[in-house]
Amino acid sequence: MKLVISQPMFFPWVGFFEQIKLCDAYVHYNDVQYSKGSFTNRVQVKAPEGIKWLTVPLKNLKLGQPINEVEIDNKSDWRTSHKNLLIRCYQDSPFFGEMLEIVEAIYMKDWELLDDLSLASLNIVSNYYGLLDMKTVTHIGNLDVQGKSSERVLAICKALHANTYITGHGASKYLNHQIFEQAAIKVEYMSYEKKPYSQRFGDFTPYVSILDLIANMGKDGINWICSGTIYWKDFMHE
């Protein structure tokens, strides 16, 4: 069984959904510390003048606060600002209407917590592309796992009887691969293909929101959610 564990992200890039496509089970890892400058509350889009950010404003943020307690600052009309930017960027894209419907379905609700908004953005896109069909989705709060860093990730794998752990490249900086080897759990890193598709406004970039893929390719965008994985030993020697 292939497992992916990920912190919440807001309408993230294609690579995030490639992990979802490859796994059998997904753990929503929302009780870890919010990291300023992460993609938990912001994501890039392509605009005529270059890369712009969709950022969800936060309030009462405290040092070390877990993601599932971070509040959204709804004093500013960030929803309208986001939609105006998306209209300006994608109104001439072939599937603009489908993309905007997805955004409006999320933005019509009064979100108070960033975690709830991020999870909703994951679910609506995953449902659009059928990525969660026949997969198990678990919140970390429903698992009785202890430890920190690699030890906790390993405990999650064991709790869900995973034999393969799929992760992004950031884990290479801290993951203790040997304890997974000892537990007979294979660690695989994403091998991002970054397959180009038709984008507006200059050279292709893969690092923008999944909303870009939807606006430009519609349901056919599933064919660009296509990366594979590489065994950790091979990845570390690339």
Image (cartoon, rainbow, N blue to C red):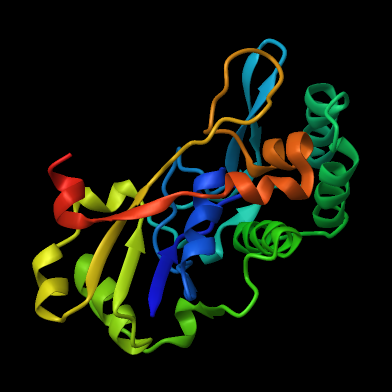
Residue positioned 40% across, 73% down in the render: 3
Is residue 136 found left or right of 100 in the rendered image?
Answer: left
Q: Is residue 114 visible?
A: yes
Residue 142's spot in the image, x, y percent? 48, 86
Q: Is residue 11 visible?
A: no
Residue 104's spot in the image, x, y percent? 87, 49
Is residue 117 found left or right of 3 in the rendered image?
Answer: right
Up/down of 196 relative to 47, above or below:
below
Residue positioned 82% across, 51% down in the render: 102
Front residue of this view, candidates 159 and 64: 159
Q: Classify residue 175 by image quadrant.
A: bottom left
Residue positioned 81% across, 27% down in the render: 90
Which quarter of the figure is the C terminus placed in? top left
Q: Classify residue 193 by image quadrant.
A: top left
Up/down of 92 relative to 193, above or below:
above
Residue 94's spot in the image, x, y percent? 85, 32
Residue positioned 31% across, 73% down in the render: 164
Is residue 182 found left or right of 28 in the rendered image?
Answer: left
